[in-house]
Amino acid sequence: MNTLKVALAQINPTVGDFNGNVEKIVNVITQAKEACADVVTFPELAICGYPPEDLLLRLKFLQDNRAALEKIAKHTEGVAVVIGFADMVDGKVYNAAALISNNHIVSIYHKVELPNYGVFDEKRYFTPGNGCLTFDIKRIPISVNICEDVWIKGSPVEDCVRDNKVKVVLNISSSPFHAGKLSQRRDILMGFARRTNAYVCYNNLVGGQDELVFDGGSLIISPHGELIARAKRFEEEVLIANIEINNSDKVDVTPNNDNCHSTISNVIAPELGRIEEVYNALVLGTGDYMRKNGFKKVVLGLSGGIDSSLTAVIAVDALGKENVIGVTMPSQYTSNETRSDAEILAENLDIKFMTIPIHPMFTAYAEILKEPFGEGAPGIEMENLQARIRGNILMALSNRFGWLVVTTGNKSETAVGYCTLYGDMAGGFAVIKDVPKTLVYELSEHVNKKAQKEIIPKSVIVRPPTAELRPNQKDEDSLPPYSILDPILRAYVEDDKSLGEIAACGFNTETVRDVIRMVDRSEYKRRQAPPGVKITPKAFGRDRRLPITNRYRAIS
């Protein structure tokens, strides 16, 4: 038997920050050496960050990415390193993994299977590879591949592993999070391990990048499909594990670390429940968006409702209470109860809290607009005017103090257009943009349960949701109950089901038709919304891309 000590470095790089990424990578290589690792892996495109999108079309970016790889190679004495980067050969660009050892680049692998669905656009940027990279450490046959290469059953990558009698597969990945994704990954990796009779060491990226969150959770799977090691999720970690392998007769490229002695026990990090993983994704995605874009503080409107309350809690967990400012902007329609709940929440979170009444501004607008509006009772234009006044106030504070405005709208509202352009949609980041309303309630209950006290006042959770833009207004005056709306939205938006298919699930046909009509006619609004954390299998924006100018209707 021979022992291979592997280190899976799930790091949080920043797209385009070559100096910062190189420093982080070199520090981890040093850490892996100190732990006596034989090989250390880094995620897919770790050197340049993932996804770099159209930066890959810039020659200088690709050249800087290669120069960073050369710098890293100088720090690999005594250890083998597998790291993701963008490789350019004869004018073609490849999603690549470099094998580095003893201060030089030994070989380069090009990703074979390029995903082009959902949030992925790899065929826009990359040429598919057609080769196979195998090597030996301690006479143990090892193969390298990248993310999607192990997702396709019966692919040439599987043939490579079987034909070369590979014992250990090093798969580097940047697999974005959505709720339940970890179990899907685990099943795929277990299937690949069983079909190839090889250990699979899966290294996943961690961190937030615009709308995407990468949750880490790197895994090592045995040839029998057993989980033998797992890293934590939503945080950087170097997972180090021992793999016991029968020797082969092949020539190997074992790093010169024979004098190194270290003992470890393989670690399996605990599972996270559905609500806990979603909450952690929201916190990580929000925090990384602020940090990586140079913002230190955020400001948001606190209405006393559940959406703004949850958003504030997430912001505090992501950035610290000293970096979150809440603003309540009461109107003549704001109840004493919601105003009080906003203040209580701010006290519970210990955040800076400001009160700016909008009634004087609203009255001035109404007077100025009286003549151009002409005769007739006020309507939705006066409701939206209140939201836009609030948006203006928040943006003015942002301009004055450099705070980023975070919006508080949820996925259910965004889907059906129950939101105001340049009003409650105004801001730089939409924290719960992909969170359905029913899930907002679950997350709010989770917040209080985790704290073992009421962070979000119970009255906020049990009060019927309302925008408070007219007397006695309730969301259900305009929308179906969220318990009905959310399953319809999931079926239409995420599962692409037709009206008939959704109605066949037991929903009223006219209700379904009304919801579909609202979703379709609100595409222009969503196109103008700020980015927000993706936590469902299909989010608006990167996932779901429909034309604004579009006469096709799914309601007939």
Image: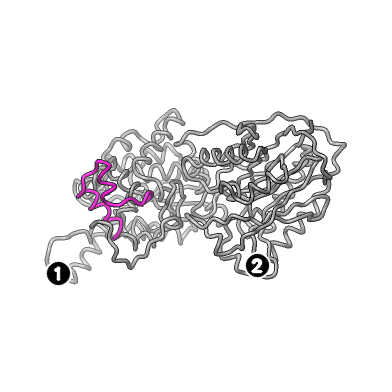
Quadrant occupied by the N terminus:
top right
Considering the whole magenta stretch, tell me its main secondary structure: helix
Residue 510 magenta-highlighted: yes
Picture coordinates of residue 498 (x, y %)? 30, 52
Q: Is residue 428 in view?
A: no
The amino acid sitting under disc 1 is Gly
Foreground mark, 1 or 2, reads 2
Which portion, as a residue range, is magenta? Answer: 494-521
464 or 147, which is in the foreground?
147
Q: Which mark is residue 92?
A: 2
Tag 2: residue type? Lys
Which residue is at the front of the view, 66 or 499? 499
What percent of the width, then of the height, locates residue 81? 75, 48
Q: Is residue 117 left or right of residue 362?
A: right
**Residue 501 x %, y %:** 29, 48
Is the residue 531 above or below the residue 372 in the image? above
Residue receiving disc 1:
374
